[in-house]
């Protein structure tokens, strides 16, 4: 086992300040050390490793260039710790040109990773207003043709951070990314925050859709889950499903078509209960998977097998 690997009940060594520095550590943006709502300082220690999964799954949405905690962690160390706990690999997800380039490069260096590339919906209004959108989208289109890319995303609509003034710009970008996914023959990873009805409207209205549509960090209720069931759209559940106040989300998971369920961390965000607010990483997937199995009253092994199969169906098999 690699020295960076994880032991249940202990924070993996690569996430401790004593771990030696590495030239492979990402130089991406840093997560705010304060809580978003209260402004209180967050605990910046990574959580202890959960018990490993009986059957491997894949983290289908992770931002490994986005730094958090007290140390920078290399992609290889992230994936080593995750693999030791039954998380066989990850889809590394871009949200602008630099992060998309990072994801493609990192996936090219580690067979356990694949990449998704996009311009985040919250960035689209500013890029369009400043005149940099066409050049940025052209670079995303170029990256989308790389052999390491299995999805275009995260793209979609976000009405939480972007007000009425930017919604038309977000819709234009969403349509453009849908077209990119169709042209590249990849899946589409959707960011949907406070915009469920409009996301469904754009997907329904688009001239063409890719074969695989994934609602990253599914945040809807049972009604949206039924719409996804009817259309064959994947629902990817993150640590939010473990939060005490996520009753509607668990209701959605309970009725989701088992063939459409995926799992993710959205790391370094959305760390599962009881470590909410602390840094997140792919090795925390087992914490979320166990809650998902409880909600659905499934055997953990059976649900893991189904999620792995679904991941292969959505993105193609690379592990």
Image (cartoon, rainbow, N blue to C red):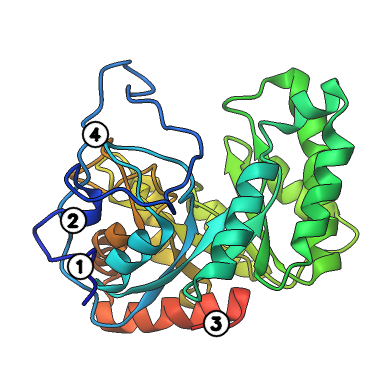
The single residue placed furthest to the top in the displayed view is: 39
Compared with residue 127, is residue 297 higher up or lower down, i.e. above or below?
below
Give the SS element for disc 4. Answer: loop
Mark 1 sits on what residue? 3
Residue in the image at 31% along x and 16% along y? 38
Residues under numbered marks 1 and 3 in contact, where contact means CB atoms less than 8 Å apart: no
Residue in the image at 20% along x and 42% along y? 17
| Separation (CA) of disc 4 from disc 2 | 15 Å
| Separation (CA) of disc 3 from disc 4 | 33 Å
Compared with residue 110, is residue 178 higher up or lower down, i.e. above or below?
above
Mark 2 sits on what residue? 13
User: Of marks 1 and 2, which one's residue comes earlier in the chain?
Assistant: 1
Which percent across, then down, holds residue 42?
A: 25, 27
Mark 4 sits on what residue? 44
Which percent across, then down, holds residue 298?
A: 28, 76
Mark 3 sits on what residue? 318
Identify the disc placed on residue 254.
Answer: none
């Amino acid at each position: 086992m690699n020295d960076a690997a994880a032991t249940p009940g202990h924070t993996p060594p690569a996430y401790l300040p004593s771990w030696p520095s590495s030239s492979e550590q990402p130089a991406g943006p840093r997560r705010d050390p304060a809580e978003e709502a209260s402004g209180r300082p967050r605990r910046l220690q990574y959580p202890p490793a959960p018990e490993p999964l009986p059957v491997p799954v894949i983290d289908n949405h992770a931002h490994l260039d986005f730094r958090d905690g007290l140390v920078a962690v290399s992609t290889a160390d992230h994936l080593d710790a995750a693999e030791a706990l039954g998380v066989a690999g990850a889809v590394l997800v871009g949200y602008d040109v630099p992060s998309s380039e990072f994801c493609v490069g990192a996936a090219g260096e580690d067979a356990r990773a694949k990449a998704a590339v996009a311009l985040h919906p919250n960035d689209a209004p500013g890029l369009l207003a400043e005149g940099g959108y066409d050049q940025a989208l052209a670079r995303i289109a170029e990256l989308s043709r790389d052999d390491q890319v299995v999805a275009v995303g995260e793209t979609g609509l976000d009405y939480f951070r972007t007000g009425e003034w930017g919604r038309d710009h977000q819709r234009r970008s969403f349509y453009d990314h849908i077209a990119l996914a169709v042209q590249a023959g990849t899946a589409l990873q959707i960011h949907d925050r406070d915009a469920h009805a409009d996301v469904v409207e754009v997907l329904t209205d688009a001239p063409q859709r890719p074969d695989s549509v994934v609602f990253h960090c599914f945040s809807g209720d049972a009604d949206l889950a039924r719409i996804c069931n009817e259309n064959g759209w994947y629902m990817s559940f993150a640590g939010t499903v473990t939060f005490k106040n996520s009753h509607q989300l668990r209701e959605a998971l309970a009725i989701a078509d088992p063939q459409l369920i995926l799992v993710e961390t959205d790391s370094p965000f959305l760390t599962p209960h009881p470590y909410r607010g602390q840094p997140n990483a792919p090795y925390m997937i087992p914490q979320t998977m166990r809650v998902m199995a409880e909600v659905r009253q499934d055997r953990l092994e059976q649900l893991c097998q189904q999620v792995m199969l679904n991941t292969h169906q959505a993105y193609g098999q690379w592990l």
